[in-house]
Image: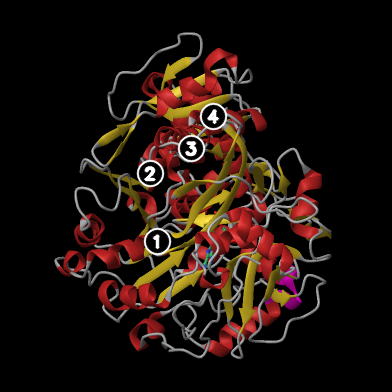
Amino acid sequence: MAQESGSVATDSMKFDPPREFQDAALISDMDEYHRIHRRSVEDPEAYWAEVADQLHWFKRWDTVKKWDEPWVEWFVGGETNLSYNCLDVHLDTWRKNKAAIVFEGEPGDVRTLTYQQLHHEVCRFANALRNLGFEQDDRVAIYMPMIPELAIALLACARIGVTHSVIFGGFSAEAIRDRVNDATCKGIITADGGWRRGRIIELKKAVDDALADNACPTVEHVVTYKRCENEIEWFDDRDVWWHDAVADADADCPAVPLDAQHPLFILYTSGSTGKPKGVLHALGGYMVYAAHTTKYVFDLKEEDTYWCTADIGWITGHSYIVYGPLANGATSFMFEGAPNFPDWGRLWDIVERHSVSIFYTAPTAIRAFLKQGDDYPNKHDLTSLRLLGTVGEPINPEAWLWYHRVIGGERCPIIDTWWQTETGGILITPLPGVTPTKPGCATLPFFGVDPDVVTQAGEPVPDEEQGFLVMNQPWPGMMRTIYGDDDRFKETYWDVIPGRYFAGDAALRDKDGYYWILGRVDDVVNISGHRLGTAEIEHALVGHPAVAEAAVIGTPDELTGEALVCFVTLRSGEEGSDDLLAGLMDQVAREIGRFARPREIRFTEALPKTRSGKIMRRLLRKVAANDPTLGNVDTIEDISVLARLQGDEE
Ligand code: WT7
């Protein structure tokens, strides 16, 4: 396990939901939570049918759930459309002129799209895609900045049954190429650039680099939105401007009734081995789960201005910026820039000016704000806020308490939401109107979620002891497979602990039945909430001609949660130098993206290995953390000899 000695103070402080919040909450009685939860796991079919009936179906399903482990189908025989449920359903109501998206760009440009306007833009872009030859079941990659057109692109694809695969704008050309080829995408939707800390991120250029030398032969079109007006290269045979494509596109584009099992999207995420996995989510189940969790976890009210600061390039943005909020008719706020540009007060300035009421961000961001002190938030009126959320990594109690006191004014419940790309939506979380919270704890399962903490053999672990977090039964948001690799899906998630969904996290359940998430147990590291596989970094490093072997581990970091430390041995004749170090850093940035740059690269003569040749990662973690139990040994060679003598071979 990655977490070896961590002890958790599970009986620490407890915070009851503020009275005022509780009185107005959708669920305001703890017994009611328990009652609904019990029923939802005992009779999931009845529960989810009731929930799904609140959405629009062109054809109602015949069977709620078909479960043939590990293959699940929800709402079998049903036909629906997520773009319809996010847009059309609101047009016959007063919400027609309600803000669906309020956007602020980094330069300060603000745009508001009502449901009516968003519907219009989505229809036109969907027809533009069709005019270019995109058809139902084609796949399209989306590589865009955080602007409304990114949401429009998702909703347009969903409208006509094109499967989207969003690639986070921080990924490199190499990473785009791998993902586009794995999903055999027929096109890419991008922008000339996006604004980040006053600079232009040249997105179209990265796409051009990815496509150079016909490296992605399935790509027929690249659609480019003009955002920054920066110079770009143009390839007549494949390039088309977004504004040209929509110029003569019809605004009439009825949503296509799609089978509930239709592949809505693919989203790549890192695993412990090999290349990133294309997590596939299917329409009906995902839609129902995203909509339902958004409503109850955020206790959504009609008048909320809801802001999730994630990027739509990650699952959080899919479920909790676009699909979940819009399916509920909410106002979803979108921001293009960085939290510290022009200074660390930017987000608080936005909260004040746009009167944001729900704010959902990552612990890394909270730790960074905490470090900057209270002055930035204190300069702003944050009293519009009524609910705070966190996601992406464990939150340390210090950050939790600061968030509660300084941002929430001790008035806002905090929901610490645990979930994954694979889960489609939030699985473990407080419900803000009822669940007493403990700093650093994700607390209790959402409706329909049936977790457990077990040993590797699947035996239950006593309360207050660490084990593996598993799910005993499927929920509607559960991924369907790894695109193109059913075997890997089964092996990764269902064969590790037979019969249960294996999340890859360690957890413990305390005596109140609360779940504490303790971190990954596999070789996945979480840097600022960005998930990376150490195998990917190692692959990038050994791709450098000077490198013989590489071992990469995650080590605790005060700010980013975890950081990468790389141990590298060189080919004979090569010598470790500052230049080479810089070259290796660049290599990782080029192969994956700048956000994946290691904190540290150490040259070493050899890597510590067990007799059977396995790299001793646990030992390397101790070395990286300067663990005092290692004693007075200087070199990794000495350390590994010592470890072998001590039988410390993991
Ligand atoms: C991994 C999933 C879910 C959207 C963002 C990340 C870690 C996530 C929490 C939390 C402790 C958390 C887990 C998980 N994680 N939320 N509230 N407390 N850990 O999605 O990139 O798929 O990463 O993030 O380790 O397995 P992801």
Q: Quadrant of residue 193?
A: top left
Look at mark 1 in the image and give the residue it sits on: 364
Q: Quadrant of residue 469?
A: bottom right
**Do the numbered discs 1 and 3 sit on residues whose CB atoms are within 8 Å?**
no
Quote the CA–CA distance across marks 2 and 3: 60 Å
Give the mark nearer the N terminus: 1 vs 4.
Answer: 4
Disc 4 versus disc 2: nearer the observer: 4
Look at mark 3 in the image and give the residue it sits on: 576
Q: Is residue 43 magenta?
A: yes
- Does the image show residue 477? no
Give the mark nearer the N terminus: 1 vs 2.
Answer: 2
Query: 331 or 546, which lies in front?
Result: 546
Residue kind at label 3, given as amino acid type: Gly
Query: 649 or 507, which lies in front?
Result: 649
* Residue under the point 76% across and 74% down: 455
Look at mark 2 in the image and give the residue it sits on: 116
Give the mark nearer the N terminus: 4 vs 2.
Answer: 2
Give the mark nearer the N terminus: 1 vs 3.
Answer: 1
Magenta segment main secondary structure: helix
Q: Classify residue 608 as left or right of residue 146.
A: right
Disc 1 versus disc 3: nearer the observer: 3
Disc 2 versus disc 3: nearer the observer: 3
**Do the numbered discs 4 and 3 sit on residues whose CB atoms are within 8 Å?**
no
Query: 55 or 317, which lies in front?
Result: 317
Give the mark nearer the N terminus: 4 vs 3.
Answer: 4
- Does the image show residue 357? yes
Dot 1 falls on a residue whose secondary structure is helix
Mark 3: few/some/many CA within 10 Å (<14, 14-19, 20+): some
